[in-house]
Image (tube, grey):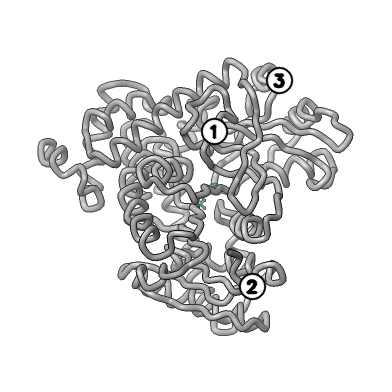
């Protein structure tokens, strides 16, 4: 039954992104009758939670709202009777991301914190934690929706569906919405007058664009894309794709495809940054420190503009709009990670895909995309198999499965290097990988 007042919980509440989220709720105050927002973190994140939590309180007060903001390290207390639980935590904090990016680069391969070797390790660290959260949710708030932002967002969503056996989960990412805003501007149209049809996996999707009259504008957007060299998301430097390839594909790639289609160029740039100790993770650590200094200011009562230096722009629009769409049965069209259910004929029926969906009170209903062109099909099937194996290895701690996943990843160029990087990363992240204890002992 629809509740009159909502309890919303955010795990990883001490994140620098929290003001985005609060701003998104405030914007939707007339459609979301919030009673309580609980920001949860762990002991290591206590100080950040206090700082950002106090800013959240000031933002809510400044907006004249009576919402209660609770800051806690007690996840179970927060989850009790929750209606929506959003997750944005990072196991091992930014220092773990630095290792995820730097160790692979030290061997000449892209780390990438979502679908490269770094992302696979992020999955190894995160899957057991999300499954634990789901276990608590089943006991304490079985009817709540889990809105996952934690990366690798698609893999985490699939782990919850397959291994957590929990259906009320939606994976989110801000990349599609960034494409929608950017490309609407390129063709000087209002995004509300266009239909963007996305299909693929998280950070690995393509899309087509249509207008209100039913015209397919994809080709036009592709042409315009080559006249602009603005990055679409702040965290990925822009390198232009090959025109002939994209025209032939007939769909718009996502920014993360640069890592695959232009792997050599991207690696060159990343190695330059690595040499200067300026990997994305290292830069983000600096931006974070600056943000938290700003957040401390008792006179700050709004989200500071500097937050837009992070890759997560429109993050709150995606999360808050999703929550409102479910709560109000808005049936808005959003791009989410959800169970495929045949929407992408080329991928397993029960896996998680990132696809345009109608968001209803009973969750996302994916819009069928049909078959992908051969080039996209080949790549996405390899990526999905890599994801499936990564999740399986994260659950079982099986070294052979982890190696299999590494060798399959198109960003890992060979068997020996796969083994070397896998071993080094297992040891480096040992503290957060209890499931791999036996394998790590053999390596050490
Ligand atoms: C993108 C992605 C997110 C990612 C973020 C990284 O927008 O969609 O999955 O977490 O950027 O941004 P950062 O500022 O942390 O590099």
Q: Is residue 59 above or below residue 148?
A: below
Please tell me whether mark 1 sits on a helix, a strand or a loop: loop
Looking at the picture, tell me which residue is in the foreground, 189 or 10: 10
- Provide residue 196's location: percent of width, then percent of height: 72, 37
Give the class, few, some or many, for how many residues have Cα within 10 Å of label 1's Cα (few <14, many ≥20).
some
Structural distance between the alpha carbons of marks 3 and 2: 46 Å
Residue at screen point 59% across, 69% down: 3
Please tell me whether mark 2 sits on a helix, a strand or a loop: loop
- Provide residue 408's location: percent of width, then percent of height: 37, 24
Q: Is residue 5 above or below residue 375?
A: below
Q: Which residue is mark 1?
A: 341
Please indicate whether residue 351 sits to the left or right of residue 345 in the image: left
Please indicate whether residue 153 sits to the left or right of residue 193 in the image: left
Please tell me whether mark 3 sits on a helix, a strand or a loop: helix
- Provide residue 352's location: percent of width, then percent of height: 49, 37
Q: Which residue is mark 3?
A: 247
Whether residue 237 appears in this view of the structure is: yes
Structural distance between the alpha carbons of marks 1 and 3: 29 Å
Q: Are circles 3 and 2 on residues that touch, CB within 8 Å?
A: no
Q: Is residue 116 above or below residue 66?
A: above
Residue at screen point 47% across, 31% down: 268
Q: Which mark is residue 33?
A: 2
Give the label, 1 or 3, closer to the camera: 1
């Amino acid at each position: 039954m629809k509740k009159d007042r909502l309890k919303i919980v955010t795990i990883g509440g001490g994140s620098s992104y929290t003001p985005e989220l609060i701003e998104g709720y405030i914007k939707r105050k007339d459609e979301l009758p919030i009673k309580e927002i609980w920001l949860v973190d762990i002991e290591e994140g206590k100080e950040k939670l206090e700082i950002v939590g106090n800013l959240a309180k000031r933002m809510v007060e400044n907006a004249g709202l009576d919402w209660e903001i609770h800051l806690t390290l007690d996840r179970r207390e927060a989850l009790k009777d929750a209606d929506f639980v959003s997750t944005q935590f990072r196991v091992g904090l930014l220092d773990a991301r630095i290792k995820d990016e730097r160790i692979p680069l030290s061997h000449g391969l892209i780390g990438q914190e979502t679908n490269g070797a770094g992302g696979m390790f992020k999955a190894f660290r995160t899957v057991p934690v999300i499954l634990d959260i789901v276990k608590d949710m089943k006991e304490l708030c079985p009817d709540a929706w889990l809105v996952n932002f934690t990366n690798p967002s698609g893999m985490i969503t699939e782990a919850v569906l397959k291994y957590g056996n929990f259906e009320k989960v939606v994976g989110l990412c801000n990349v599609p919405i960034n494409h929608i805003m950017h490309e609407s501007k390129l063709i000087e149209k209002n995004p509300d007058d266009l239909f963007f049809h996305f299909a693929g996996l998280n950070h690995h999707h393509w899309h087509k664009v249509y207008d209100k009259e039913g015209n397919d504008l994809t080709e036009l957007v592709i042409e315009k894309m080559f006249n602009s060299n603005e990055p679409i998301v702040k965290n990925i430097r822009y390198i232009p794709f090959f025109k002939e390839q994209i025209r032939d594909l007939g769909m718009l790639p996502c920014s993360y495809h640069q890592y695959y289609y232009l792997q050599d160029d991207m690696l060159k740039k990343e190695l330059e940054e690595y040499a200067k100790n300026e990997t994305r993770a290292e830069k983000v650590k600096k931006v974070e420190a600056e943000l938290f200094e700003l957040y401390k200011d008792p006179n700050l009562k709004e989200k500071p503009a500097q937050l837009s230096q992070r890759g997560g722009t429109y993050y709150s629009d995606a999360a808050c709009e999703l929550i409102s769409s479910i709560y109000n049965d808005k049936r808005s069209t959003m791009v989410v990670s959800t169970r495929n259910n045949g929407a992408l004929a080329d991928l397993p029926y029960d896996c998680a895909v990132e696809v345009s969906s109608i968001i209803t009170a009973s969750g996302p209903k994916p819009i069928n995309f049909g078959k992908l062109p051969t080039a996209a099909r080949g790549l996405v099937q390899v990526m999905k198999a890599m994801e499936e194996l990564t999740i399986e290895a994260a659950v079982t701690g099986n070294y052979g499965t982890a190696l299999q996943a590494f060798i399959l990843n198109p960003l890992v160029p060979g068997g020996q290097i796969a083994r070397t990087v896998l071993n080094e990363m297992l040891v480096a992240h040992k503290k957060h990988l209890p499931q791999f204890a036996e394998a790590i002992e053999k390596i050490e």
